[in-house]
Amino acid sequence: MQANRLNPIVRLAGRAAVAVSLGSVLMVAGCRQDMQDQPKIISQRGSEMFADHRGARPQVVNTVARGQLREDSYFYTGVIQGANGYREEQNLMPFPVTLEVLKRGQERFNIYCTPCHSRVGNGLGEIVERGYKPAANLHDQVRLAQPLSHYYYVMTHGYGAMPDYSSQLTPVDRWAVAAYIRALQLSQSAKQEDVPSGEQLKSLKEVAAEQHLPEGFAEPWALPSTAVQAYPHDAKQGTPALAPANPADPAIKIPASKPAPAAAK
């Protein structure tokens, strides 16, 4: 009687085992490797699809990535191709200069340029007082004569002791800083007739007094004794912001050569 009662359970377990086995067989039969083994390119691997067996294909000639079509070469380089084949800087902006552009240029200038050039651009920034080579005085005759795109080019590639700032300043910000530099230069010799009607021209001393800045803020700034290659004051370069200027053509002195030793007799 007990064996008869177990038979239904045994039979049910046997049927379940058969069903599972049959399902496994069907599943295995349905699994194919077509998608795994299909011809395709796998990163950093070779390929048999091409004659050179390289999976990474070279770019089509003149391919330009999305967002990198720099049709306006002057905007991105600050130079044009001259008739003589040389690159030429230009005294023009690639886009209109608005008050917002100047404010942006002032903000970027105060952040990245003032440590060396100072806020008035006379080349006597705080880092110079700590022994760094004096930066260019943006108000001397040489810099005043340089075209506007020269500043963009220098910010892009660096010049002398100045590193490039292409990582810190986007192209549009470099142009904004260049525009602000030119405005800063014009401000040093501004006359009442140069400003819009109704605007009052103020000296740096008056602005300093209104903003409650320390006494002596607008006084002459002397080149510190810790500065490297401290040049004497050169009046012909002007005194923007009452600051001494570096000469554009410093004298280069070459020590006299020692006489050659007499030939042995």
Image (cartoon, rainbow, N blue to C red):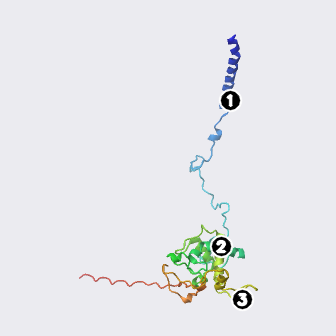
**Disc 1: CA contacts within 10 A as few (<14), some (14-19) or many (>=20):** few
Residue 98 seen in render:
no
Give the residue type that dot 2 points to.
Glu
Q: Is residue 6 left or right of residue 260?
A: right
Work out whether mark 2 precedes mark 3 in sequence or the reverse, and give the earlier one: 2
Residue denoted by label 3: 193
**Disc 3: CA contacts within 10 A as few (<14), some (14-19) or many (>=20):** few
Per the image, label 2 sits on a secondary structure element best described as helix
Residue denoted by label 2: 107
**Disc 2: CA contacts within 10 A as few (<14), some (14-19) or many (>=20):** some
Per the image, label 1 sits on a secondary structure element best described as helix
Work out whether mark 1 precedes mark 3 in sequence or the reverse, and give the earlier one: 1
Quadrant including the C terminus: bottom left
Picture layout, residue 129 above or below residue 71: below
x 67%, y 62%: residue? 67
x 65%, y 71%: residue? 173
Residue denoted by label 1: 26
Q: Position of residue 222 (x, y in %)?
A: 53, 83
Q: Position of residue 130 (x, y in %)?
A: 51, 75
Distance from disc 2 to disc 1, alpha carbons, whole Å, reads 71 Å
Disc 1 vs disc 3: Cβ atoms closer than 8 Å?
no
Observer-side mark, 1 or 3, equals 3
Give the residue type that dot 1 points to.
Leu
Per the image, label 3 sits on a secondary structure element best described as helix
Q: Position of residue 83 (x, y in %)?
A: 62, 78
The answer to which quarter of the image holds residue 1 is top right
Disc 2 vs disc 1: Cβ atoms closer than 8 Å?
no
Distance from disc 1 to disc 3, alpha carbons, whole Å, reads 94 Å
The answer to which quarter of the image holds residue 259 is bottom left
